[in-house]
Image: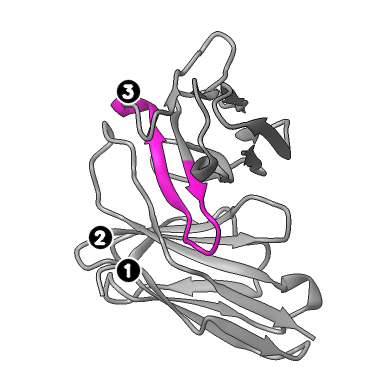
Amino acid sequence: GAGVSQTPSNKVTEKGKYVELRCDPISGHTALYWYRQSLGQGPEFLIYFQGTGAADDSGLPNDRFFAVRPEGSVSTLKIQRTERGDSAVYLCASSPYEGLAGGHIQYFGAGTRLSVL
Amino acid sequence: AQRVTQPEKLLSVFKGAPVELKCNYSYSGSPELFWYVQYSRQRLQLLLRHISRESIKGFTADLNKGETSFHLKKPFAQEEDSAMYYCALSTNTGGFKTIFGAGTRLFVKA
């Protein structure tokens, strides 16, 4: 498959549990983004990776949220002590690096729908 | 702070009519602006970006720095244009944080 893959597609968990959401970017894409989308809203930026490092994590709402990309490819978004307010669709996007002069075209996955009961 | 505003949640037009989806932004630097589209049961995908100055599927968008706007226009709407449209702004200083608007649902009636 050539697209961005996110697993699982749906995740139901109980309040207080820990969850991990996985994103497989398009091969060769150095940039990776995580977003959260609540009903009726646009995607909300969480974190941006360039390679293995988090270049901008200013969108993570609190310290319960953490993301890693240890080998510069697959990324995992981790949420500790989930709350009902964390219920949303979590989107991942990857992008080829085009330098500062280029507009970063982002290729999106289908998302993971997280439901916290 | 960076912000993207799409004032219309829903826009309904007849087939063949002109359409304009509004987008205003707030950013102190030089922004990169995009329109993304999500068709029914499909992923979010890029429609166009201001840096390319291109027309995609008959849509165009012009960056107006004076009015801080990036409105999306099409002279003759088609039924297949019905979708959710998101305006997005990427900062280009250091990281590439991207801010999306809340989206406008376009419904083109036959």
Task: Give how far across and how far down residue A107 sits, in percent.
Answer: 37, 56
Are labels 3 and 2 on one chain? Answer: no
Identify the magenta region: B36-52
Q: Residue at x 38, y 41 (%)?
A: B94
Above or below residue B57? Residue A52 is: below
Task: Give how far across and how far down residue A36 sits, in percent.
Answer: 61, 62
Q: Which residue is mark 2?
A: A29
Task: Give how far across and how far down residue A17 sits, in percent.
Answer: 70, 91
Mark 2 and mark 1 in contact (Cβ < 8 Å)?
yes
- In the image, what residue type sits under mark 1? Pro
Q: Residue at x 52, y 52 (%)?
A: B38
Label 3, label 1: how many angstroms apart (C-alpha)? 27 Å
Are labels 1 and 2 on one chain? Answer: yes
Above or below residue B84? Residue B17 is: above
Local SS, label 1: loop
Q: Which mark is residue A25?
A: 1
- In the image, what residue type sits under mark 3? Arg
